[in-house]
């Protein structure tokens, strides 16, 4: 049986068992408190820490601890993707005029997420992108034009992103989307009202970052191409749960995001 046939068969099987699987994971992150991710951008701008930071720190910290980013490309790519997602949410909000909200998403190099990646830079022969993040935080705090600093931060992040097999990238993407589902679950109530805009916005940023990562995969392998197409489809379905970053309600559900993560993971494992 070819890998392509395995992938299609596996996806058909997933449809029959997804309800049970999603019941088991649909509540992850809900109601969690605990200590949050350190965000020094708030102190630089004189703002309060912001709602839901504790819950965010719980879900992202848990996601960050799955492997050693110095040696595990899936974990390393996942952490870079989470940083990318924060930058995306920041930039879209900032450009739309929601600068106070935006500042809560730009992460200083001393934030927990960055310090979780930093030990991997030396073993990987990289220097890190703390200077670029610091410049972006400062520009955002000043309230002026951030285009140059944002471009520099994204360029530096891209320079730290290693080339990896399609399966590895897709596995990292599935983990990022699972974190997005946790954040969405925290931010959105059962009736669709958005009770925590910060987490809702994080989830959006992580999905867009995942889409960018999938779009960057370069391959001519037909099995990988099928898996990439499936990933794009699932990410677009998940993004349909969002009606603007400052919306008050949504018809989306975390199960859509969890389902996308599961299907992309299955597709990735079909390539191994």
Image (spheres, rainbow, N blue to C red):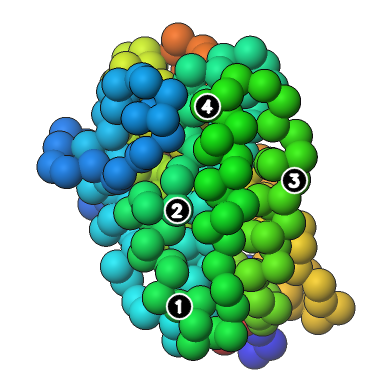
Instruction: Give the answer, above or below, for where 213 lies relative to 198.
Output: below
As helix, strand or loop, the secondary structure at mark 2 comes to loop
Neighbours of disc 4 within 10 Å: few (<14), some (14-19), many (20+): many
Mark before the other along the chain sequence, 4 or 3: 4
Neighbours of disc 2 within 10 Å: few (<14), some (14-19), many (20+): many
Q: CA distance from mark 1 to mark 4?
A: 29 Å
Residue 162 locus on image (x, y percent): 65, 76
Neighbours of disc 3 within 10 Å: few (<14), some (14-19), many (20+): few
What residue does disc 1 label? 120
Q: Residue 233 or 216: which is nearer the viewer?
A: 216
Side (left or right) of 61 relative to 205 = left
Which of discs 1 and 2 lies nearer the camera? The answer is 2
Residue 151 marker: 3
Task: Identify the image quadrant of residue 3.
Answer: bottom right
Instruction: Give the answer, above or below, for where 63 lies relative to 243.
Output: below
Instruction: Give the answer, above or below, for where 138 lies relative to 263.
Output: above
Q: Residue 116 or 128: which is nearer the viewer?
A: 128
Mark before the other along the chain sequence, 1 or 2: 2
Mark before the other along the chain sequence, 2 or 4: 2
Residue 141 marker: 4
């Amino acid at each position: 049986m070819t890998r392509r046939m395995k992938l299609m068969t596996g996806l058909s099987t997933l449809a029959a068992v997804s309800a049970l699987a999603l019941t088991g994971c649909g509540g992850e992150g809900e109601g969690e408190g605990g200590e949050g991710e350190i965000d020094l951008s708030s102190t630089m701008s004189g703002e309060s820490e912001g709602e839901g930071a504790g819950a965010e720190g719980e879900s992202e910290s848990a996601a960050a601890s799955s492997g050693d980013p110095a040696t595990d490309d899936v974990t390393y790519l996942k952490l870079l993707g989470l940083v990318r997602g924060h930058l995306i949410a920041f930039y879209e909000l900032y450009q739309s005029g929601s600068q106070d909200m935006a500042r809560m998403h730009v992460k200083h190099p001393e934030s927990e997420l960055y310090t979780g990646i930093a030990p991997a830079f030396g073993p990987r022969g990289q220097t890190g992108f703390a200077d670029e993040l610091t410049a972006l935080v400062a520009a955002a705090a000043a309230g002026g034009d951030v285009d140059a600093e944002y471009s520099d931060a994204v360029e530096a992040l891209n320079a730290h992103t290693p080339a990896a097999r399609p399966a590895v990238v897709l596995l990292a993407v599935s983990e990022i989307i699972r974190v997005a589902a946790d954040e969405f679950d925290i931010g959105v109530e059962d009736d669709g009202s958005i009770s925590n805009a910060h987490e809702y916005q994080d989830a959006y940023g992580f999905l867009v970052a995942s889409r960018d990562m999938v779009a960057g995969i370069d391959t001519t392998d037909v099995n990988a191409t099928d898996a990439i197409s499936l990933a794009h489809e699932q990410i677009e379905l998940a993004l349909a749960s969002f009606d603007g970053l400052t919306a008050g309600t949504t018809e989306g559900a975390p199960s859509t995001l969890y389902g996308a993560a599961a299907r992309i993971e299955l597709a990735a494992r079909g390539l191994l």
